Amino acid sequence: MSSKRTLASFVLGMAILFSLGTFASAEADLQAAKREGKVVWYVALTTDFNQQVCDLFNKKGFGVQCVFHRDGAGPLYRRYLQEAKSNINVADVFTFSNLGYFLQLKQGGYLLPYRPRGTERFNPFFTTEDGSWMIPLATAQVPAYNTKLVKPSELPTSWTDFLRPEWKDRLVLPNPSFSGVAAEVMIVMVKKFGWDYFEKLAKQNPRIVPSASGTLTFVERGESHMVVYAPLASVFDHAQRGEPLKMFVPKEGVLVNGIPSAIPKNAPHPNAAKLFVDFLFSREVQQLIVDSGYHVGHPEVKYPPGLPPFEDLKPIFVSPEDAEKETPSMKEGFRKFFGV
Amino acid sequence: MPRVVAVLRRFEATTAVWVFVAFVLFVLILNPLYHLVLESFQLTRGQGVEWTLRNYIKAFTEPLYRGPVLWTFIVSAAVGPLSLMVGAAVAWCVGRTDMPLPGFIRTSVLLSFVTPPFLGAIAWIFLAGPREGWLNIIYRGITGAAGHEYLFNIFTMPGVVFTMALFTFPQVFIVVLAALNNIPSDVEDAASIAGGNSLSTMVNITLPLVLPALMAGLLLAVLEAMTLLGIPAVLAIPARQHLMTTQIRAIMDEGIDAVGLAAAYSFPILVAAALLVWMQRAALGRRGYATVGGKGGHRRPQKLGVWRYPVFAMCMVPVTCAIVLPYFALIATSFMKNLGHGLTWSNMTLENYRSIFQSRAIASSMVNTLLLATMAATGATLLASVIAYISQRQLVHGHRHLGLLATLPLGIPGIVLGVGLFAAYTKAPFVLYGTLWILFLAYVTKFLPLAYQASNAALMSIHPELEESGRILGANRLTVFKDVTVPLFKVGLLASWLLVFMPSLRELSTSALIWTIDTKVISVVILNLYDEARLADIAALGVILMIVTLAVVVCVFRMMGRDFMRA
Amino acid sequence: MRVPDDGPGFHEGLKGSRLATVDLVGLTKVFGGKVRVVDRLDLHIEHGELVSILGPSGCGKTTTLRLVAGFLQPDEGEVRVDGKLISSSSFSVSPDKRNMSMIFQSYGLWPHKTVYQNVAYGLKFRDVTRAEADRKVRAMLEVVRMEGLADRYPAELSGGQQQRVALARALVVEPSILLLDEPLSNLDANLREEMRFEIRRLHDKFKITSIYVTHDQAEAMVTSDRTVVMNMGKVEQIGTPREIYERPRTRFVAEFVGKTNSFRGVLRGRDQLEVAPGIFLRTAGDNEFREGQCVLASVRPHNVELYSEGRGPSATTGHNVWSGRVTRAHYFGDSVDYLVELPNWPQPIRAILPPNVWFRTGDPVRLVIDPAKCVLLLDLPED
């Protein structure tokens, strides 16, 4: 306890020193951001959450207005590239999933590297060396079930339990053609169990749904009893709202995928963008993110009840390179076994 | 020199108007198409582009892409005749018989036209999902069948066809009803007097007269079925089958070059559209369809006698499937606290509505949507009616091509059209991205074919001699257009206006690519909510959307369409 | 034959109306790049003359009318009014500036306007005060006997009444030229007959230079001062209705205008036509034809007489007299239509007789034709 306090005061002291040293430049950056007046956030998180973050940012009195453009990850990525191609500069900050996209953006020279303040203390999974992108939040892809329709005794303990006969016709799966994270889960599963796993899973006749969180409505309404993998944050959110939905972690662990943030090189408000990214990685916002059911790299946040801490997830990661390289073959393999 | 003067004098002042309209159309349609074709021949290389045929080669050799093409043609070949039959039959009952409550049927059919198809598809999951669909629960309740048995399974290809037909038959209905309203009863009476019964009168006289409208309706339904994205995404994917639109959507997520590939891949739909339009023209040929002669005409309903109520009941079948059941599902869902706790009193809440009414973003999207739909409907109707006029009265060279051009956007899947529009209106001389104008142009472009088909069918039934008698009496072309054509054309114009207004309210696949923060529309809000799996909010928004639309449509009828209301 | 008829109070209104001459010079219209729908048509129409253009459908008569109206532009030739050019291949005064009126086959009445509004429409474009326009419309409705129905809509009128409204609408603007395009084809037989006289009455009253297009020879006969018979885009013959009927110049005219028997043969002497080896038809003769020339003879069925065997004039009177047998007899009430076969003749002869004599099929008859009624025509090769 006392050692923790000592650590905290040490960190605080360091932070004060650090901020004093950079005070002049920080003040200059703030002035520049104020002149830009606006930050446009391309984000694939939920509208409610984005609104909360923007409202909080606007209340800080930086004199910078936060507006967000919410869409799916794929559409946001495509839109940005099209805009860039037409020399239209709108986006200041990206926050959407699939590291593969960010790897492509980096390779295409579209990104402005920036390491937000304080992130040097983050869990390294949430940061990059060069700051091309940073990860303000991550979520796990977990199985979840309808608590009215699945008895606790039935619960699988391993991913391979889904192949048992009692799960025939009761499962639902997201389609990797539409859901980037679904493809990432598949990369992990194929590495662990081989394609054989999906061939057998297909024989269980699961329902196939385009979007990852769309699977949840099938489970809630009882059209399916269990989703094999869905974003933990969505499960948490829906359960919080009172849906009969519960997640669990199979013994092999679950994929945790980072949802990166980056600043594009052609951002029309680069200083405001940096200010906003700093804000995203601040303790206040990181706590807000955690309260919404995501996981973060900030060492000092408190996880809400019902949300297992990061380590308990037995997290498995997919490298950006793998995500980029393997995704097409995942879509193709899925198509082969499931038809879509 | 005298020759130049002669040429100048020959150049009627009003010709300038026709040439201008033709030019507008040309730019409107060809600009995005041009950019689309350009994209389809490009691959990105670093910061530059490479010219290549590889997109086409991949689109037509990749075996995975073949199934969706085949199934798209199968599905639309099924949806077309189905919605033609239903739409034409209901239109005839409403417009031509003394069936009870024609106004109710008409309004209901129109309502199903404004319902976003993917909202309808979601509603049908609630109704006919094999395990938890309410209709199946009722079925099991009545028959005592086991829990895994079901009567309906919406996640099948027939389910997809069924749901698509529910949302395409209103187009047939509107076009055919407008045409029926233009046929004077005396034409039908002539046949009855000659000894035909009601059925043979309908088959031999009425049917041929509304043939252009029927063909137009069929064309619209088939092409709509080919380019719909929402229903296949919601129903066909769970049915384990990609259609072309979902395949395109999947391709689009694959990176920057995906756009060119998607454009190349949508080529078969474009060809099919052009082919269908050409076939429609060939079939109609040069047959005269001038039915509104100077003799005018009364319209008297067919007496159905004892069949009045059975016919009404028949009309209620599609109305029940398209409106009553889905909106029951949506309204019920809109009051649910949790989807997982079903239809119980303790699970009821007004929270969903409260959150929608409190959202400023949704309010401004609603305003944007209504504004855009009104603008687009007016713009497209004006443009389409003038084009139909030019093309039928053969006012400029190449008038035949104008009609084809105006129909072309039908064959471009909305998502692909969005790409073309994006490319076309983010560059000089038309930098409209980020403004409502790009959405306005998108809707005008996308729905121009609907307006054109309606205007054309309506105009076809106005005899040219009605205009010529005005001309010879001293009125110039524009005056005649205003004094004679437009008033006679009013029902057709209203049909055309509604045919653009209503789908504009729900347009998604194109808007999804070109909306921006300040120009968000309601369909995009719904899509975002769907992404977030907020079905109860979607249901509430869908109900609100329906009420607002209903109010607008009723106002429009009151304002300009007494004729249409009376039918 | 024109009977000037001072209509009630209207005549003075038309005093300023300028009656025009019309000249069609080498007028040609080509459709689809090759079909010469109207082929080098020449026609002069006098002040106040009513000329009908008669021909089968597709002969180019309506096209000619539309060329005059300005709805079409000629590919060659000119249209002149009072000597002034109004249409040529490179120039065309638009229809609304020609001060013409037109009656259409479908009448072209606007169903959304009342009778009064229909008639008044054209006056909007003329320099007429509102009060004056009202007076003119009411006067014109009176002329066409429609004064009580001014507030009706066209759909509420009978066919004949609609036709009268169309006439009123065309005449009220005091056009210098009136064009009529098959105006009676939509009426039933009785009404058609009545309206023929009505049109002639109105023409005699207003004396507007008129062109009347029809495929019905009776209509052309009754209404017009002169008739132009057209076929395949070309003029076959121009003349008074009497000339056209009694002295057709071509086989087409003979056969199209009224019914006829035509015989092809070789001219022997001045007036003997050898229609079959050794069989001669005595004709009126024609100095235009020479002996040995192949020509046609046209005999109207009305000019063929039939008698019971052994009665009627004999061959010595100079008439053509043959014995034959009735092969067909149709009773029409006011006449009987016979077909008579003569031995060795190449074709049966048609005869139309009053119903006071009555032969049955198979009856032997004596057939008599007055040579003066056998008109010789140029034998053109079959079309």
Image (tube, coloured by chain):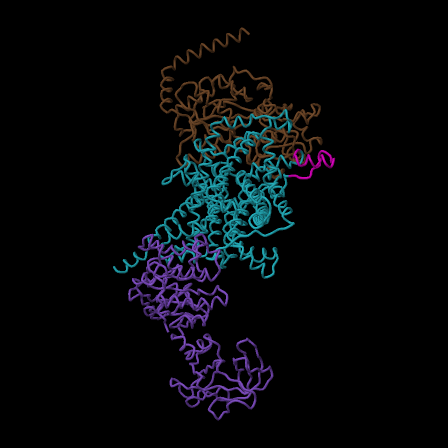
Residue A169 in view in this figure: yes
Residue A142 is situated, as x and y percent measured from the top left of the image, at 61, 26
| The N terminus of chain B - image quarter | bottom left
Q: Is residue B180 magenta?
A: no
Residue B490 is situated, as x and y percent measured from the top left of the image, at 46, 48
Q: Relative to C49, does residue B393 appear above or below in the rendering?
A: above
Q: Relative to B364, does residue C79 appear above or below in the rendering?
A: below
Residue B191 is situated, as x and y percent measured from the top left of the image, at 57, 59
| Residue at x-position 32% and y-position 62% | C14
Q: Nearer the viewer, residue B560 or A227?
A: B560
Q: Nearer the viewer, residue C307 or B552?
A: C307
Q: Which chain is depicted cyan?
A: B
Chain C's shade in the image? purple
Q: Relative to C216, does residue B136 appear above or below in the rendering?
A: above
Read off the magenta span.
B132-153
* Left or right placement of residue C2 versus residue B157 in this view: left
Q: Nearer the viewer, residue B114 or C253?
A: C253
Chain A's shade in the image? brown
